[in-house]
Image (cartoon, grey):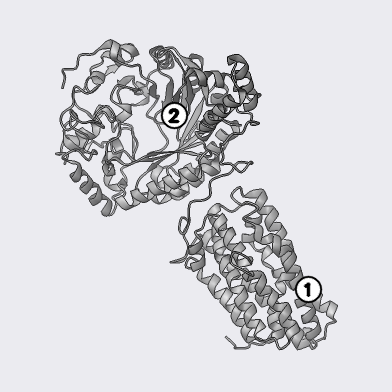
Amino acid sequence: MNAVTPQRTAVPAPVGLLAELTHRCPLRCPYCSNPLELDRRSKELDTETWQRVLTEAAELGVLHVHLSGGEPTARQDIVAITQTCAKLGLYSNLITSGVGGALEKLQALYDVGLDHVQLSVQGVDAQNAEKIGGLKNAQPQKMKFAETVVALGLPLTLNSVIHRGNIHEVEGFIDLAVKMGAKRLEVAHTQYYGWAYVNRAALMPNKAEVDRSIRIVEAARERLKGQLVIDLVVPDYYAKYPKACAGGWGRKLMNVTPQGKVLPCHAAEMIPNLEFWYVTEHSLRDIWTNAPAFTAYRGTDWMQEPCRSCDRREKDWGGCRCQALALAGDAAATDPACSLSPLHAKVRALAAEEAAENPPDYVYRTIGSNVRSPLKEEAPL
Amino acid sequence: MNASFPTPGADASQRLLSPEELEAALRDIGARRYHNLHPFHRLLHDGKLGKDQVRAWALNRYYYQAMIPVKDAALLARLPDAALRRIWRQRIVDHDGDHEGDGGIERWLKLAEGVGFARDYVLSTQGILSATRFSVDAYVHFVSQKSLLEAIASSLTEMFSPTIISERVAGMLKNYDFITKETLAYFDKRLTQAPRDADFALDYVKRHATTPDLQRAAMDALTFKCTVLWTQLDALYFAYVAPGMVPPDAWEPGEGLVAEAPARGPAGAPAGTLVASDVPRLPRGVRMRFDQARDKHVLLAPERTFDLDDNAVAVLSLVDGNRSVAQIAQALAETYAADATVIEADILVMLTDLAQKRVLER
């Protein structure tokens, strides 16, 4: 498993950088992709460091920068950071909740060359949306924000994370995207890591609901061709094959956390014994090429059966390492979301069982919470 | 149902009105009670309803439309005179049509389909509010049980409808992007039909309401009919505007819908299909740049990167928001000494593909 020798010439450059500028966020979504242990403001990288990271990213071959968080506009220097992207020719994508200070910074972001806005919407019905996001009066702010994005002429993507609390609203999300003038809609079924893993029983939809949502999206894609592009992320637990996590481990993306730790994917910190490097100590190129966390599961040499001899091994790259750890207890196992995994039937049964029960209350995302991943204490399956 | 209560202030109406005074009194009822005054209709006309609220209206109102010929048939059955029947039966023809696919009910179905409903779901009336059913049934019952004069007088709301219809067409077309002119075809016909119907009915009432009691009965009948319409909007408002209490079994947003027809561009082609005269441009958020690390040109777009070959780069370099597709083809034809028509056909395919992915606009 650790026999991978980094082959410097063979590592293709990353195309995307997910810059998690801060973990601060006015919303408290129970499926947040941030880790359970959130970085505090005092640990965040300063403006100059981010600008250096972006410069290194551009030199390394990164094309897209996703300015994310937390809520990226919670940082006062979001405009300066966006401007740096523009100067470097990096495509800047603001991934925002649209609440807090987002609206008031929008014009300045537009002026310095922001390329695209991805706005999260928790629900269509305001009451439901605000229950999920854990923030009162968020919905009207989001709608106003979306309107302003479109009025400025910026391309808008709506991102809806789907779970049992809003899966009945999939059609509504589509209507909303059309109404708001969004060009893209992401109908992204929850991926169960981080906070979503803790809240899995409260979030897991049943198979019939999932199938229905997929049918609705497929019909809408046809009907709205040329008007709205809809990207669909199907829920892993009900899938036949796993998704190529982040386009394959260490192949396309790198993720920099608020305090400068560089991850191959946003959930990678849950895997024990992985050694992560920091932008404050290494150059981005060095990290991409040599950091143990990146080389650990890059390529196919680390794979076990059934992945090792599978025809799809360079399509889905074994699926998600974090999910393999969470469900199979081994980060190098085949992702149990794959129908070829010996654990797949159990995963499906587990999902069906949870979806059939009354949902427990959400455990809302909170900085400084005592919530710990259940992984460390319990046998995963 | 047939209990009769004393009318307060009946004394004041004991004088026989002249036909003109009667008409004025009837028009006054409409001016005060016709449903164009209802808050729900105000919201509808002003474009302040959401798509689902417009759907709820279209669905419920279908039941009213569907029962109108039943009501008129009940009235027709009681008309003793062939000349009158010939006139009245025209209403049934208007609504039912002469053949499959014709008539007012069909046009209302088109409206309901236009806002997204499955035809069968609308036909089943299973999602309508009980209050809609009760009101409409009460109207049919009224017309079959009351005197012929009262039955005919109850149809006089048509005197007020041309205004509201033109308001509705204009208001909706202006305010709802999901309502098309085809969807509103119903109203084009009603603009001419309603006045014709109303003229006859008004004339009949004026000639036959020959005593104070009969005049009072005619006015009450019209008031009753206004209430039938008003109550339906009360129920819609209560269920779908505020407080938003949808009764059990009534339609909930999302039910009974089908995939809509694909959006069409001005030329009738699917949205995003380009023609030679279109002037394409890359919108904000889509940029072509050279990718040094990979030694090739790429098109950067929201969450996506397109690898570009030399041909694509040559075309996109000329996409500037000023040149038409034909002009781009012409320029390329000159540069590469090739046939402009062949190039035009090729680049239309490429540019249409990008337009459908929402990374190119015209």
Question: What's the distance in space between the residues labelled 2 and 1, CA to CA?
Answer: 63 Å
Q: Earlier in the sequence, mark 2 or mark 1?
A: 1
Q: Amino acid at mark 1?
A: Asp
User: In which quadrant of the rendered view does residue B20 lie?
Assistant: bottom right
Labels in figure, total: 2
Q: Amino acid at mark 2?
A: Glu
**Residue named by callout 1:** B199
Q: Secondary structure at mark 1?
A: helix
Q: Nearer the viewer, residue B357 or A78?
A: B357
Find residue A190 and report its horizontal and vertical position in percent.
33, 40
Same chain for marks 2 and 1?
A: yes
Find residue A233 and report its horizontal and vertical position in percent.
36, 38
Horizontally, residue A272 falls left or right of residue B303, namely: left
Horizontally, residue B72 falls left or right of residue A328, namely: right
* Residue at figure coordinates x 49%, y 33% from the top left: B357
Residue B164 in view (yes/no): yes
Find residue A245 and report its horizontal and vertical position in percent.
30, 30
User: In which quadrant of the rendered view does residue A1 lie?
Assistant: top left
User: In which quadrant of the rendered view does residue A314 lie?
Assistant: top left
Q: Secondary structure at mark 2?
A: loop
Query: Chain letter of disc 2?
Result: B
Q: From the image, which quarter does the C terminus of chain A lie in?
A: top left
Residue B31 in view (yes/no): no
**Residue named by callout 2:** B303
